[in-house]
Image (spheres, rainbow, N blue to C red):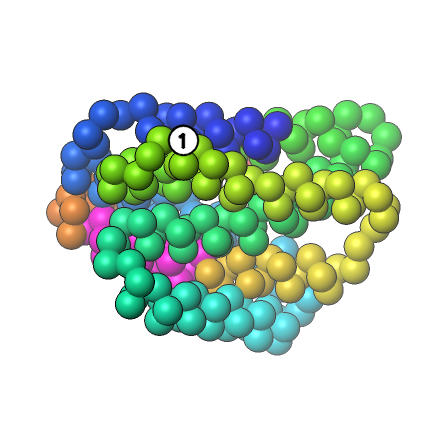
């Protein structure tokens, strides 16, 4: 189900022919608002609850350090900002999807249909994530088949996380907390340092602000009702 949601988002992202800079900027700001709200109100509180605030800061800094290293090495190999941003967002989503997969797996290990419910909710949650990975690549004229393959890869950690959870039945809260903390660090850095400045440059402050507000509202509704 998680794979389905991500791929639906990717298909939406590549369906627009010759996307304008304003459309890409709006997409980036919407996704930035969504990712920011989910990071602040979902990832960070859960990471602190599982692993403590000290470990949260330590592992989130590790996530930021990972991004800085990737930025350093990618700067000399790829001058396309949109491709680099899509890669950074994909990395954060991959780390975020692994604990999501664990949640699905644990749900299937319980009585009732909790696992199925979690799968549906996470699939809906992953649609905008698929869009934000695919749209910058589509704008940069990357082959559509390659875009679908790259987006598919971002969803695989959820699949493997679910398999691991089902296989072992339980996993250390420390591991879950560490994964969430690294993901939060990466996502916050990408949103604040990469996505929002690029969105503002592409579509202007007004459209960027509108997209971020809409994304934040959507993220808040997802957290409240899902």
- The reply to whether residue 67 is visible in this rendering is yes
Tell me, yes or no, whether the highlighted magenta stretch contains residue 211: no
Q: Residue at x 36, y 48 (%)?
A: 86
Quadrant in the rendering for residue 109: top right
Indicate the secondary structure of the residue bearing disc 1: helix
- 112 with respect to 41 (left or right): right
**Residue 76, above or below 163:** below
Looking at the picture, tell me which residue is in the foreground, 84 or 181. Answer: 84
Residue at the disc numbered 1 = 145
Looking at the picture, tell me which residue is in the foreground, 66 or 181. Answer: 66
Quadrant in which the C terminus appears: top right
Tell me, yes or no, whether the highlighted magenta stretch contains residue 192: yes
- 107 with respect to 186 (left or right): right
- 65 with respect to 121 (left or right): left
Instruction: Specify few, some or many for label 1: CA neighbours under 10 Å numbering under 14, 14-19, or 20 or more.
Output: few
- The chief SS type of the magenta part is helix
Give the extent of the magenta segment.
187-200
Q: Position of residue 167 (x, y in %)?
A: 84, 44
- 89 with respect to 138 (left or right): right
Looking at the picture, tell me which residue is in the foreground, 169 or 72. Answer: 72
């Amino acid at each position: 189900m998680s794979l389905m949601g991500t791929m639906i988002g990717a298909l939406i992202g590549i369906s627009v022919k010759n996307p304008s800079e304003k459309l890409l900027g709006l997409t980036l700001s919407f996704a930035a608002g969504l990712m920011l709200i989910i990071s602040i109100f979902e990832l960070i509180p859960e990471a602190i609850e599982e692993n403590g605030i000290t470990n949260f800061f330590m592992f989130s800094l590790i996530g930021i350090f990972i991004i800085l290293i990737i930025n350093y090495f990618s700067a000399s190999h790829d001058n396309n900002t949109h491709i680099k941003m899509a890669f950074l967002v994909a990395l954060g989503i991959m780390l975020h999807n692994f604990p999501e997969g664990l949640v699905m797996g644990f749900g299937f290990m319980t009585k009732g249909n909790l696992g199925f419910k979690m799968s549906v909710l996470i699939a809906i949650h992953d649609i905008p994530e698929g869009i934000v990975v695919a749209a910058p690549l589509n704008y940069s004229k990357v082959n559509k088949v390659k875009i679908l393959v790259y987006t598919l890869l971002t969803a695989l950690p959820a699949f493997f996380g679910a398999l691991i959870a089902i296989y072992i039945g339980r996993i250390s809260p420390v591991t879950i907390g560490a994964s969430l903390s690294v993901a939060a660090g990466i996502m916050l850095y990408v949103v604040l340092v990469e996505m929002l400045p690029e969105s503002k440059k592409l579509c202007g402050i007004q459209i960027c602000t509108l997209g971020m507000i809409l994304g934040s509202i959507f993220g808040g509704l997802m957290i409240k009702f899902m």
